[in-house]
């Protein structure tokens, strides 16, 4: 009886220790799911798949890309926010997800501040003002004159209402005082095709989406909404060079995880993501595609997002832009 009692006590001790040993299992110990809130084939998808390949090697676990488009990125963001905060679900989030949506929608299925924790900003997609054959102007001055001379305002395309492309043009409208009329599309590609085809005079586009059209002469790059000229377009001036300060806009794509994710796990993800982004081969792939690689700390990314919210929420409120 005594031996049986001792054996029973030992068995209970082993059962108590087992969960603790399991909980102490080093991260990561299984595949990581990477949600991309856009369809396959776009710039955000390319960024995720390129970085994901290198991240797989560094983590020693498979990184599985899961495209969840829809709801102006809210579907993917909501699913991430509801996921277990264990570091095995992360989200590609742009400034639409984390900055614009809370100001554009009265009701949102997630809270970007309370529900999601920043890990790192992966890259920037600087915006470029491009014109097609429907607009005869070859520079920003001519573009603005055409807008001023139009009684109803000059039409412009965008990748969709609430997209960085849309709000970049609204920023230009505020900074220059000209009348521009928004014509939203479902994605940058169809909008750009119509600019090249002459159906729409102009739009703001990121280099990743527009490089082929610009290099092929189908659209003309008039100015870049960036603090400095882009190395891929050295002859295209910045808006600041032309006297229009403050016309700076880019799609900012980073990684976020559920808010309650432990800090050591976030730090591990950050360290491996930044190392992957800074790998020379991967970095060159991103640059060639038209992405400006970044890779910063969670605190730096958090501060940037707060500054962006202050800047863009004022613009959205002043222009009374609502999507619901």
Image: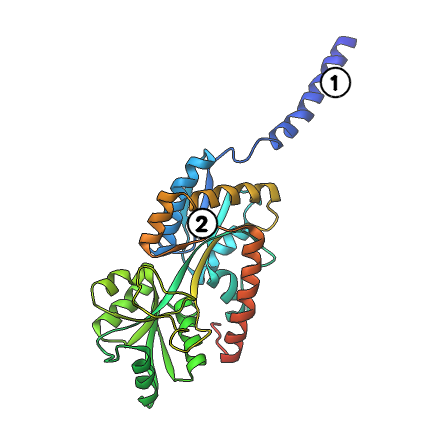
Q: Nearer the viewer, residue 226 or 38?
A: 226
Left or right: 13 in relation to 271: right
Q: How many marks?
A: 2
Give the x, y percent position of residue 256: 52, 51
For marks 1 and 2, give the CA distance.
Answer: 45 Å
- The coloring applied to the image is rainbow
Mark 1 — residue? 9
Q: Quadrant of the N terminus?
A: top right
Give the x, y percent position of residue 322: 49, 74
Q: Secondary structure at mark 1?
A: helix
Give the x, y percent position of residue 89: 50, 45
Q: How many other residues sit within 10 Å of disc 1, few (<14), some (14-19) or many (≥20)?
A: few
Q: Nearer the viewer, residue 37 or 98?
A: 98
Discs 1/2, front: 2
Left or right: 194 in relation to 58: left
> Which residue lies most toward the right here?
2
Q: Secondary structure at mark 2?
A: strand
Q: Is residue 96 above or below residue 167?
A: above
Residue 244 picture quarter? bottom left
| Residue drawn at (49%, 47%) of the image | 90
**Residue 62 shows up from this direction:** no
Mark 2 — residue? 35
């Amino acid at each position: 009886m005594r031996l049986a009692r001792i054996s029973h006590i030992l068995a209970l001790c082993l059962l108590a220790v087992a969960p603790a040993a399991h909980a102490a299992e080093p991260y990561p110990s299984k595949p990581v799911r990477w949600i991309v809130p856009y369809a396959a084939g776009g710039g955000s998808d390319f960024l995720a798949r390129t970085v994901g390949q290198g991240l797989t090697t560094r983590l020693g676990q498979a990184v599985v890309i899961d495209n969840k488009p829809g709801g102006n990125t809210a579907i993917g963001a909501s699913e991430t926010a509801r996921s277990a905060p264990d570091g095995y679900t992360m989200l590609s989030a742009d400034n639409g997800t984390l900055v614009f949506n809370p100001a554009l929608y009265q009701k949102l299925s997630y809270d970007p501040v309370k529900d999601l924790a920043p890990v790192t900003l992966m890259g920037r997609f600087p915006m470029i003002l491009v014109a097609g054959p429907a607009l005869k102007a070859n520079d920003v001055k001519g573009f603005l004159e055409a807008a001023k001379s139009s009684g109803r305002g000059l039409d412009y395309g965008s990748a969709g209402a609430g997209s960085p492309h849309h709000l970049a043009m609204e920023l230009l409208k505020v900074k220059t005082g000209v009348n521009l009329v928004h014509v939203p599309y479902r994605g940058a590609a169809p909008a750009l095709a119509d600019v090249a085809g002459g159906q729409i005079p102009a739009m703001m586009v990121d280099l990743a989406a527009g490089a082929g059209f610009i290099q092929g002469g189908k659209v003309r790059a008039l100015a870049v909404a960036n603090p400095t000229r882009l190395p891929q377009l050295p002859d295209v001036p910045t808006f600041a060079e032309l006297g229009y300060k403050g016309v700076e806009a880019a799609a900012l794509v980073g990684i976020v995880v559920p808010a309650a994710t432990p800090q050591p796990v976030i730090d591990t993800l950050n360290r491996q993501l930044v190392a992957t982004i800074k790998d020379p081969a991967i970095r060159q792939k991103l640059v060639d595609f038209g992405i400006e690689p970044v890779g910063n700390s969670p605190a730096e990314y958090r501060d940037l997002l707060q500054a962006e919210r202050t800047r863009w929420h004022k613009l959205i409120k002043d222009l009374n832009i609502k999507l619901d």
